[in-house]
Every structure is written in structure tokens, then in C-alpha cells.
């Protein structure tokens, strides 16, 4: 079936496949498609979807699941998403969930102005709706793994850590091998004056391999929570 078509039967078929016979709509393990369509109205200010969809402020979102980030021909993506696509980022339930929760924290210099959707169930509902516009959504490789949406958000205690800027400066030499302390972006995004919570979320996304850059995954994997908080505090204070 064309990914640009969304009759009610598609949603029903998806629900039947995931739930089995006799399953109640309220127990849909992916999300409520109808509720997701309501949430989609916020997205429709910049994105289009469906049979007549075209690129607009943002790219159209037909066939999104299973597609490499920034790989839709004809749309000028931000440098951040282009880099992440080159690093191998593929849009799955999990990566889209992380991006929608906090676009700026997930893709540092994304041009998407949307502030993010905090509620995990609302994200699941929206993604259930978007899946109906991807070809054969039941065949997407991650479907069994994401049958139960999870809130990948950090423990609030991690975000509440008060980092030591002086310790962060001591740790920063590895960062400034690539990132310019003066905030200039010479092919690599600036991390100077980043909000501390965005820095922490981004580094933990590398630790969890949601962000795909292998070098950053390795570096983040060596850092503990206190060290990440210290780096965040240091770079936030730089002029």
C-alpha cells in the first residue's frame, strides 16, 4: 500500500497485527493513532504528510520510518542532521522518540524550532500516527522491540547534578581537540554556551548510542555523570 495513503483500515490493520485478535484499542502497545493525528496538528505548521504532501518549511514525512536522517532528496537539511545521517543515524521509533522529545538536545544545530514533546505517551501516539504513512509499518525491523514505548528521558537526579566548572575545564582538553572553545564552528558544531541540560542530554544520548557518531559514543562512554555535569558547567560559562 502506498505510504501516502492513510485509510482507517491501515490503522486498524496495524493495531490488529500488534495486539492480536480481540485486543482493545486502548491497549495498543505502540500508541493511539487517532490521538496521534490530533497531536500532529502542531507538526503540520511546518510538515506535510499524505497523498499530496510536499516539502515545505520542513520535509514531508511520508516514508519516514527506516529512512536515514537527512536522506530525503531535494530538501536542504541542517548541517547537524546532515552530519548525523552521514554517521549512520536511521529514523526508528527510538531515535524519533528522542528527537521529538528534545530536538535541540538531540541534534545540536537543528533548524526545527519545535521545543519538544515531554509526554512519553503523546510521543508514542504521534509516532503511531506517523508509522501509518510508512510502507508496511509492521515490517519495520524495530517493530517488535518497540512494542512498548519507553520514556528514554534521563533520571532527574542526573539533570540536577551541579557540575564543577573548574573540574570541567580540566577535563575539556579532549573536547577542544575538535570543538573550538571560542565558539567558532569550523565544520564542527560549537558547544560553547550550550545550556547545561542540553549538553547533558546530548552526551547521555551518545552514551546510549542514540546519537550515532562513533567517536563521541566512545568519549561519552568513558565519562561518568559527574564528569559530564562538570563539562556542561564549564562550556556553559565560556564567553
Image (spheres, helix red, strand yellow):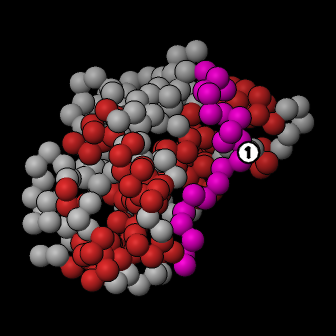
The single residue placed furthest to the top in the displayed view is 1
Q: Residue at x 23, y 65 (%)?
A: 173
The single residue placed furthest to the right in the displayed view is 22
Residue 236 seen in the current view: no
**Residue 174 picture location, percent across and down:** 26, 60
Q: Residue at x 24, y 24 (%)?
A: 74
How many callouts does the rendering have?
1
**Residue 32 picture location, percent across and down:** 66, 46
Picture layout, residue 166 above or below residue 12:
below
The residues colored magenta run 136-157
For disc 1, the marked residue is 29
Picture layout, residue 145 above or below residue 174:
above
Task: Please identify the dominant SS of the magenta region.
Answer: loop
Instruction: Report helix, strand or loop for mark 1.
Output: loop
Q: Residue at x 48, y 71 (%)?
A: 225
**Residue 179 picture location, percent across and down:** 19, 57
**Where does the C terminus fall, quadrant-wise?**
bottom left
Q: Quadrant of residue 164?
A: bottom left
Query: Is residue 233 highlighted in magenta?
Result: no
Q: Quadrant of residue 69?
A: top left
Residue situated in front as seen by the camera: 123 or 49: 123
Residue 87 seen in the current view: yes
Query: Is residue 139 highlighted in magenta?
Result: yes
Q: Quadrant of residue 80?
A: top left
**Where does the N terminus fall, quadrant-wise?**
top right
Amino acid at each position: 500500500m502506498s505510504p501516502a495513503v492513510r485509510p482507517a483500515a491501515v490503522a486498524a490493520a496495524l493495531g490488529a497485527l500488534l495486539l492480536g485478535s480481540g485486543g482493545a484499542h486502548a491497549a495498543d502497545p505502540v500508541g493511539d493513532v487517532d490521538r496521534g493525528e490530533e497531536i500532529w496538528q502542531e507538526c503540520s505548521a511546518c510538515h506535510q504528510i499524505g497523498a499530496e504532501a510536499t516539502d515545505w518549511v520542513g520535509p514531508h514525512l511520508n516514508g519516514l520510518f527506516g529512512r536515514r536522517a537527512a536522506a530525503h532528496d531535494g530538501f536542504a537539511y541542517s548541517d547537524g542532521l546532515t552530519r548525523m545521517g552521514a554517521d549512520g543515524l536511521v529514523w526508528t521509533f527510538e531515535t524519533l522518540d528522542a528527537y521529538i522529545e528534545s530536538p535541540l538536545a538531540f541534534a545540536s544545530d537543528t533548524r526545527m524550532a519545535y521545543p519538544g514533546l515531554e509526554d512519553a505517551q503523546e510521543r508514542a501516539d504521534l509516532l503511531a500516527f506517523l508509522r501509518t504513512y510508512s510502507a508496511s509499518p509492521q515490517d519495520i525491523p524495530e517493530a517488535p522491540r518497540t512494542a512498548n514505548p519507553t520514556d528514554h528521558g534521563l533520571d532527574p537526579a542526573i539533570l540536577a547534578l551541579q557540575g564543577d566548572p573548574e573540574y570541567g575545564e580540566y577535563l575539556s582538553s579532549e573536547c577542544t581537540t575538535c570543538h573550538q572553545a571560542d565558539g567558532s564552528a569550523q565544520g564542527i558544531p560549537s558547544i560553547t554556551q550550550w545550556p547545561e541540560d542540553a549538553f547533558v542530554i546530548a552526551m547521555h544520548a551518545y552514551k546510549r548510542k542514540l546519537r550515532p557518531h562513533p567517536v563521541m559514543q566512545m568519549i561519552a562512554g568513558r565519562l561518568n555523570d559527574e564528569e559530564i555535569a562538570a563539562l556542561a558547567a564549564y562550556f556553559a560559562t565560556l564567553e
